[in-house]
Amino acid sequence: MSGLKINLVVIMALMLASVQFHDTAAQTTHVVGDALGWNIPPNGPSAYTTWASGQTFSVGDVLLFNFTTGFHNVAEVSQAAYAPCTTANPISIATTGPARVTLNAPGTHYYICTVGTHCQIGQKLTINVSAASATPAPSPTPVPVIPTPVSPPTATPTPTPAPSTTTPPPTSSPAPSSEDGSPVSPPTFGQSPSGSNAPSPTDTTILPPPSPSSAPSFTTVVPFTFLAVALAFFY
């Protein structure tokens, strides 16, 4: 969040600097007479007429009159006062040099020096000021978008199939057969000498143990014994 705020501050500063740059670039300073400055021209008023013909003046531009204070001044006068060099009631006057005059309105502007006869011998200037050209507004600087970090997708583990615990059914082995293919008869018990069927030595039949109820219990015999002794003692 702090990084985004810093970026916005930098962008706003750049936009303000751009607007000021456009305003400064649109304002042009014209040095009146160039190297001649604002003085009595050696060849009459044509020197300033020639200089003005090579300039383009717009509203917002500045005229810079370079002169020595106390020797010259610059006054803006009306068209009627310009031709006869009338010094009374000027529109504006600057007596300290160098003087800067801002062109605030379009149209024709007239300037003279009111010191002595300087205007009559050629220290005068006429210029044509055009309306200020529309300065295109600076295009807004796009605000950089900070991408939101996206976590990589988590791989889903593939379930491993559990080993089968089912016991396969037992396979029946084939019954033994004789050489001619007939089934073999199971073994028979031999007869005992007394005529009873006794198990053969190969008989593995296990007989169950005798039931415990057939033998007299010790816990049953002892109480009766004590009872008989007690009866004999009393009688």
Image (spheres, rainbow, N blue to C red):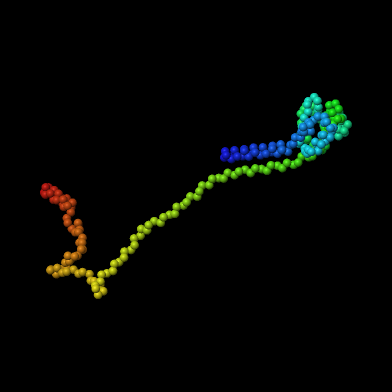
Outermost residue to the top: 70
Residue positioned 14% across, 51% down in the render: 225
Residue 221 in view in this figure: yes
Residue positioned 82% across, 31% down in the render: 41
Closer to the camera, 124 or 209? 124
Outermost residue to the front: 42
Closer to the camera, 52 or 222? 52
Image coordinates for residue 216, horizontal then vertical, percent: 17, 55
In which quarter of the view is residue 138 placed? top right
Q: Is residue 17 left or right of residue 94?
A: left
Please state the total of marks drawn on the protein image.
Answer: 0
Closer to the camera, 152 or 171? 152
Outermost residue to the right: 84
Q: Is residue 99 left or right of residue 180?
A: right
> Which image quadrant: the N terminus?
top right
Seen in the picture, residue 45 relative to 174 is either above or below; the reply is: above
Residue positioned 77% across, 33% down in the render: 34
In which quarter of the view is residue 119 placed? top right
Closer to the camera, 187 or 94? 94
In which quarter of the view is residue 180 placed? bottom left
Residue 112 in view in this figure: no
Seen in the picture, residue 221 relative to 38 is either above or below; the reply is: below
Image coordinates for residue 224, horizontal then vertical, percent: 15, 51
Residue positioned 69% across, 37% down in the render: 20
Image coordinates for residue 176, horizontal then vertical, percent: 25, 70
Seen in the picture, residue 167 relative to 127 is either above or below; the reply is: below
Image coordinates for residue 153, horizontal then vertical, percent: 50, 50
